[in-house]
Image: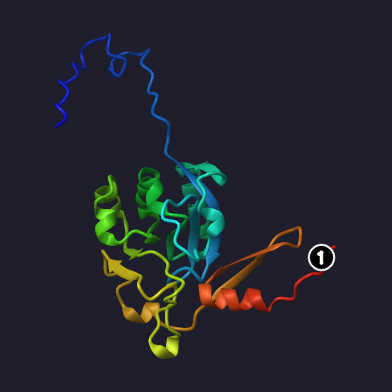
Amino acid sequence: MVSPLPPVDRSDPSDPSDPSDPDAVDDRSPPTLVVARRIPVTLAEGPGRRFALWLQGCPLRCPGCCNPQMLTFEGGSRIPVDTLLEEIAQATRAHALEGLTVLGGEPLAQIEALTALCRGVTPLGLGVIVFSGYRRAEAERRPGFAALWPTLDTLVDGRYDARRPEPAPLDGGRRFIGSANQRLWHRSERYRDPALWTGQPRVEIHFDATGGFSAHGDPNTLDALLGALPRRPAR
């Protein structure tokens, strides 16, 4: 058992956190997320036009992970939450966004900063969807989840299982979901309508100024697409 600390006397000028002390220094840094990738507008990562954000690092290491380059906690770009909120606000104005989707990696591995981000988009009127490899019961045992949950509209839970791909739409499969074991938990009514999760799977390809490209969306469709691309001969 951890004994509670005695209360701090805030009137004590020797206390460095005393707000009345003009020389006090607040050493708390603003929340920062380690980001693997972000796209200002997409139709492939949830209902409607969305800002998609992939976070770097995952402790779960699911076999056949869709984003193996995002498993390591090394790499990515460290970006202040305030900067991301500015980008999301600009994208909302430019593209009439419906919401924010956060994927990974494992978003709950950065739960405090994630909560700050999700809370920060509320004034923009955006819906929030988070994809996590943790089952909801596991997530609820993680420190910080109780604060995150009220900021979400929908949680998609469960480890990606390449052996159990989501069925095709004609067989009752859900759009935007990678494997059949993953579940939808709706905290609000915003995305509860099953019709929002039905339809043809979608893949998007984004080209950069150098001629390179990146792709994202339905894992099964994406695998088939990339597998059909011609391979350049080795030099």
Question: At label 1, which amino acid type do we have?
Answer: Ala
Query: Percent from the top left, x then y, of residue 197?
Result: 39, 77
> Is the residue 39 above or below the residue 34 in the image?
below
Element type at mark 1:
loop
Q: Residue at x 27, y 13 (%)?
A: 15
Q: Quadrant of the C terminus?
A: bottom right
Image position of 215 (left or right of 163) = right
Q: Quadrant of residue 6?
A: top left
Q: Residue at x 47, y 64 (%)?
A: 63
> Is the residue 105 above or below the residue 228 in the image?
above
Q: Quadrant of the N terminus?
A: top left
Q: Check disc 1: other Cα within 10 Å, few if <14, some if 14-19, many if 20+.
A: few
Given residues 82 and 56, the one toward you in this image is 56
Q: Quadrant of residue 171?
A: bottom left
* Number of callouts: 1
> Is the residue 185 above or below the residue 171 in the image?
above
The residue under label 1 is: 234
Give the residue at the far top of this rendering. Answer: 14
Query: Percent from the top left, x then y, of residue 123?
Result: 36, 53
Query: Percent from the top left, x then y, of residue 51?
Result: 49, 60
Image position of 28 (left or right of 8) = right
Q: How is the image coloured?
A: rainbow
Image position of 113 (left or right of 230) = left
Given residues 146 and 57, the one toward you in this image is 57
Give the residue at the far bottom of this rendering. Answer: 170
Q: Residue at x 32, y 64 (%)?
A: 154
Given residues 67 and 126, the one toward you in this image is 67
Whether residue 58 is visible here, answered yes or no, is: yes
Query: Percent from the top left, x then y, of residue 212?
Result: 72, 62
